[in-house]
Image: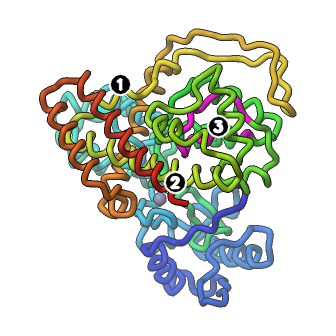
Amino acid sequence: MTQKIKRKWHPNFVKYVKFISNHSNYKGLFFEQSNNEQIKWVVTGNSKAGKNRRKWWDKKCKEFGIKIEAGCYAKIARVIHPTKFHVCQICGKTLSIEYIYPNKRLLSRFNKLFKKNLSPYKLTIFEMIDKFIKNSSDIEKLLKILEIKLKKFKNISKLKIYIKKELTDKCNKKFLSPGVMSNSPDRYDGFHSDGNCCRSKSDKGRHKSNLQRYGQDRRVYENWSDGDWKKADRLMSEFRKNDISADHIGPISLGFCHRPKFNPLTKEENSSKNNRMNLSDVKILRKDEKKEEVISWHSKFIWDKLKHKIKTDEDAIKLSNLMRKNLHYILIIFSMIDENGYSSFLKQFLNPKYSFFDYKFVGFNPKTGDYEKIITKKLTGKNQKNNINRYYRIAFKKLEEYKNVNNRKTHIWKSKEVDKEMDNLFQLLEKNNTRKATKQLKNVLKIIAEIGYKQFMQK
Ligand SMILES: [Zn+2]
């Protein structure tokens, strides 16, 4: 879980590395090659290699008359860069190293004034002008947010030239931003994309603990899980604050609810579990079930058929695998419904209502996960609306994955009966009969669960 994953370079970036490291502008800039002849692009600044590189950049600064001071490496790296475009290591997209993107503040002013919803680093200021500035009143509005007073621009190309000369070339930070971060001498070319091209706006500026939480609730949305996810998230973060990893007794990737009940685990224990249940987990779930729902509605069919058949740890593992497969089938079914234009029918199975509450756990004990009491607060802000939109977005985005042919080939059921009942479902959806369609969907899921049941029984 805490292991670092070594990312593979994007093919575009591999090409970029080759191009830059062989370019005459970087002649003499130190690099090492590893065994497989891959260039070591990244070094740490204080290593021998890093110091070596810094010496080279110092020399270049002198050569170009740039004073050695804070920010000088960004300057010199920009000056000598042969194309002025940097390629992202992760996604392979290209962003300019020059100040041609609106910064956060300009973008939000622009979006407000022009009633747009542009996200950062998608368009340059020049592309925005071409696309949205059509007449003299548009020009006036833009000049206002750029705080340019004196000029009267008769035409748009003059305005663009002015912005290039006065803002871009002067590295104006008040309104503009380059597509990359300066990262010298660590990165060979002196730049790092910082995920501007491939990380969504909503992920930016979160700290690590938030990111972890983010990863958590995302899976809840993606698996269309039931349960008071808000309360569960809040309790989970109590564990995290104490550096303890909290484990679901019934994993949400198998169709269980995101409930505010966890097993405190060490990190090693948690990563070795890998979303599988053992016999004692199944026993706890059967017991908990007498008081509250533990399984999401869509996965209840397989769980109810098999939960009393589990006698050994081996059985529990088998059940885990079958439930995982069952959830793949379910998400394929949802993706087919979505694909045929019935997303509003599917929305009834999501639980945005939990977004409107917040919780505090008083007297929390991280070792046992117990607490004295919960303080509940009702929320009614704009944030809640955003959260709900994000919830829908993530849940439906996951279904996109299941529309992929390869995914369907790998995971789809091979049952004529299911196919037939799916046809019936679509007929009801076409007739707009939500109540009957919901009943029929449950019927399909029951038949799907039957497939898993048969596989379990054929020992
Ligand atoms: Zn990227």
Name the mark nearer the viewer: 2 or 3: 2
Residue named by callout 2: 457
Q: Position of residue 308 (x, y in %)?
A: 61, 39
User: Looking at the image, what colour scheme do you see?
Assistant: rainbow
Which of the two labelled residues, at mark 2 and mark 3, occupies the earlier sequence position? 3
* Residue at the image position 35 percent from the left and 33 percent from the top: 442
Mark 3: secondary structure: helix
> Mark 2 or mark 1: which comes first in sequence?
1
Q: Residue at x 80, y 16 (%)?
A: 362
Q: Is residue 250 magenta?
A: yes
Mark 2 → mark 3, Cα distance in angstroms: 43 Å
| Front residue of 291 and 384 | 291
Q: Which mark is residue 210?
A: 3
Question: In the rendered view of the protein, which quadrant contains the C terminus?
Answer: bottom right
Task: Identify the image quadrant of the N terminus.
Answer: bottom right
Residue 53 screen position, x and y as percent: 70, 76
260 sits to left or right of 218: right
Q: Is residue 63 left or right of residue 397?
A: right
User: Callout 2: 10 Å neighbours few (<14), some, many (20+)?
Assistant: few
Q: Above or below — where is 115 with respect to 401? A: above
Determine which residue is flagged by label 1: 348
* Amino acid bearing label 3: Asn
Query: Quadrant of residue 370 in the image?
Result: top right
Q: Amino acid at mark 2?
A: Met
Label 2 and label 1: CA atoms lie apart by: 34 Å
Q: Is residue 122 visible?
A: yes
In-front residue for pair 240/140: 240
3 or 1: mark nearer the eye: 1
Counting from the top left corner in percent of width and height, residue 441 is at 31, 34
Does 343 sit above or below residue 433?
below
Mark 3, residues whose alpha carbon is within 10 Å: few (<14), some, or many (≥20)?
few
